Image (cartoon, rainbow, N blue to C red):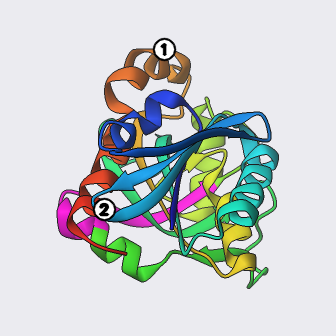
């Protein structure tokens, strides 16, 4: 069993398009889920949570109900590394909570599933590998962006991946997040977000669906 999640429906639609047949529709913690097949893999798709608390809450509920071996989180994020550009796709190799992070906290990073990372890169070679950092803040200033990047050296920032990674780690579930950059995390972030969310957000989940069509996990 593989669980695939996103914050918004737009971010998971790429996987929904390849889900056939649909075996079950339902709700979990008042959020929708759909169970079905992608290739020969049984998957559960769910979305509809914002921030670390809701992300962790949903991750634990989905793990408790479906007991997946793999958990993949898809969606969008803001750039932190000044070399990163809108439209680039990042596969997280480490997950860091920047709002509680200290370099002295040796257990503050969670490592991604190597098997998931390898399989994702096998179907789409134009992927950047690197850390993803998360926190309960919408980064939209050059000063805050530089601060978080200097502290974490993460490629991108979101509000959910590190929380889900922590829950998966504690439950022994293999985890990976795949994100596309839709804003630069600076003063124009809200304009960039509105401009790019619908046209770019589905790509990571479409890549995950292609990976599941090719590989039996």
Q: Is residue 137 left or right of residue 147?
A: right
Callout 1 secondary element: helix
Quarter of the image where one finds residue 184 = top left
Q: Considering depth in this image, is 120 or 14 the residue closer to the camera?
A: 14
Q: Is residue 198 left or right of residue 122?
A: right
Q: Quote the CA–CA distance across marks 1 and 2.
A: 34 Å
* Res. 163 mark: none
Q: Residues at badges 1 and 2 in contact (C-beta under 8 Å)?
A: no
Q: Is residue 147 left or right of residue 202?
A: right
Residue 97 makes an appearance in the image: no
> Dot 1: within a 10 Å radius of its alpha carbon, few (fewer than 14), some, or many (20 or more) residues?
few
Closer to the chain start, of discs 1 and 2, is: 1
Q: Is residue 29 above or below residue 99?
A: above
Magenta run includes residue 152: no
Q: Position of residue 90 (x, y in %)?
A: 38, 55
Callout 2 secondary element: helix
What residue is drawn where x is 51% and y is 74%?
Answer: 112
> Dot 2: within a 10 Å radius of its alpha carbon, few (fewer than 14), some, or many (20 or more) residues?
many
Q: Which residues are magenta?
A: 120-133
Q: Position of residue 205 (x, y in %)?
A: 37, 46
Q: Is residue 131 left or right of residue 107?
A: left
Q: Which residue is mark 1?
A: 191
Quarter of the image where one finds residue 94 = bottom right
Q: Is residue 29 above or below residue 62?
A: above
Magenta run includes residue 132: yes
Q: Position of residue 125 (x, y in %)?
A: 17, 62
Quarter of the image where one finds residue 212 = bottom left
Q: Considering depth in this image, is 211 or 103 the residue closer to the camera?
A: 211
* Res. 212 mark: 2
What residue is drawn where x is 47% and y is 57%?
Answer: 43
Q: Considering depth in this image, is 39 or 196 the residue closer to the camera?
A: 39
């Amino acid at each position: 069993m593989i669980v695939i999640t996103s914050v918004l429906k737009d971010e998971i639609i790429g996987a929904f398009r390849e889900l056939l047949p649909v075996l079950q529709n339902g709700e979990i913690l008042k959020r929708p889920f759909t169970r079905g097949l992608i290739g020969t893999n049984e998957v559960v798709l769910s979305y509809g949570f914002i921030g670390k608390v809701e992300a962790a809450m949903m991750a634990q509920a989905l793990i408790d109900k479906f007991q997946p071996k793999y958990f993949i989180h898809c969606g969008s994020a803001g750039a932190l590394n000044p070399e990163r550009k809108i439209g680039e796709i990042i596969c997280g190799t480490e997950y860091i909570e920047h709002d509680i992070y200290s370099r002295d906290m040796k257990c503050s990073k969670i490592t991604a599933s190597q098997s998931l990372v390898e399989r994702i890169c096998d179907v789409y070679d134009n992927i950047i590998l690197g850390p993803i950092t998360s926190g309960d803040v919408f980064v939209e200033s050059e000063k805050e962006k530089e601060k978080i990047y200097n502290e974490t050296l993460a490629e991108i920032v979101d509000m959910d991946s590190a929380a889900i990674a922590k829950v998966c780690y504690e439950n022994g579930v293999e985890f990976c997040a795949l994100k596309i950059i839709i804003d630069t995390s600076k003063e124009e972030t809200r304009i960039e977000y509105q401009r790019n969310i619908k046209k770019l957000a589905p790509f990571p989940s479409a890549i995950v669906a292609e990976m599941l069509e090719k590989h039996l996990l």
